[in-house]
Amino acid sequence: MDIQYKKLADYLNMVIKERGLIIIAIDGPGGSGKSYFSDNLNRHLHKCQIIHFDDFYLESDSECHTSSEIGSSFDWTRLESEVLIPLKKEKKAFYRKYDWIEDKVIGNYEVIPEGIIIIEGVYSSRIELRDYYDYKIWVEADYQLRLNRGIERDGDEMREKWEEEWMPKEIKYIASKIHNPRENADIIIHGNSGDCKSFNMLKTKICF
């Protein structure tokens, strides 16, 4: 079912008038089209701030990267303490970003508790964070397409990282009965399309 971005945005803009603040997780495996979907949706939203879960990646010397725990390379506790808890209290949030070139956490970025806050990134709707969100959107795409997109973005030198580490870990996350991110999503989007005007919706629990 092709749905216009504007149609979903109109619904969210209406909800904002009633609530003042809503927080949305846009989750899904790497290369599925989460950022593309978020950016296109944002064009139609009145007030929106996007926070990328990639900014909460752990530095390379962290022992968590070798952990078998799901999503262990991302510091979800920092996302919770620096962003989600303050926002739920309707307070300004200040967070630091992981710099992928410098391999360290830097800066002090402000998030104002109003309008629509999008938390975009794989593992963003994990069970520990789920209750902070008003809506959860899952974006998925075919394996080979996701890999191709990842290599195109990051370079062929990152192919092993994608094939041997990131994608297997994401498959484990998707299959997890504890996190179960796909089944707990309010909307499921198929990210194969490159259409900037509409998207293919596979499931929704929201009437809009």
Image: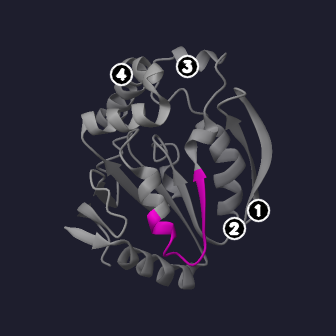
Other residues around mark 4 within 10 Å, as few (<14) / some (14–19) / many (≥20)? few
Question: Mark 1 highlights which residue?
Answer: 92
Decide whether residue 123 is among the magenta residues.
no
Labelled disc at residue 53: none
Query: What's the magenta region?
Result: 40-51
Q: Amino acid at mark 3?
A: His
Sequence-wise, which precedes: disc 4 or disc 3? 3
Measured in 3D between alpha carbons, the distance from the residue under mark 4 to the one under mark 1, in whole angstroms, is 39 Å
Q: Does 156 sit left or right of 100 as displayed?
A: left
Q: Are marks 2 and 1 in contact (CB under 8 Å)?
A: yes
Q: At 40% across and 22% down in the image, what residue appears?
A: 159
Measured in 3D between alpha carbons, the distance from the residue under mark 2 to the one under mark 4, in whole angstroms, is 38 Å
Residue 148 in sight in this render: yes
Question: Mark 2 highlights which residue?
Answer: 113
Q: Does 103 sit left or right of 193 as displayed?
A: right
Sequence-wise, which precedes: disc 2 or disc 4? 2
Q: Amino acid at mark 4?
A: Glu
The quarter of the image holding the N terminus is bottom left
Q: At 30% across and 77% down in the image, what residue appears?
A: 207
Question: Mark 4 highlights which residue?
Answer: 163
Labelled disc at residue 65: 3
Sequence-wise, which precedes: disc 2 or disc 1? 1
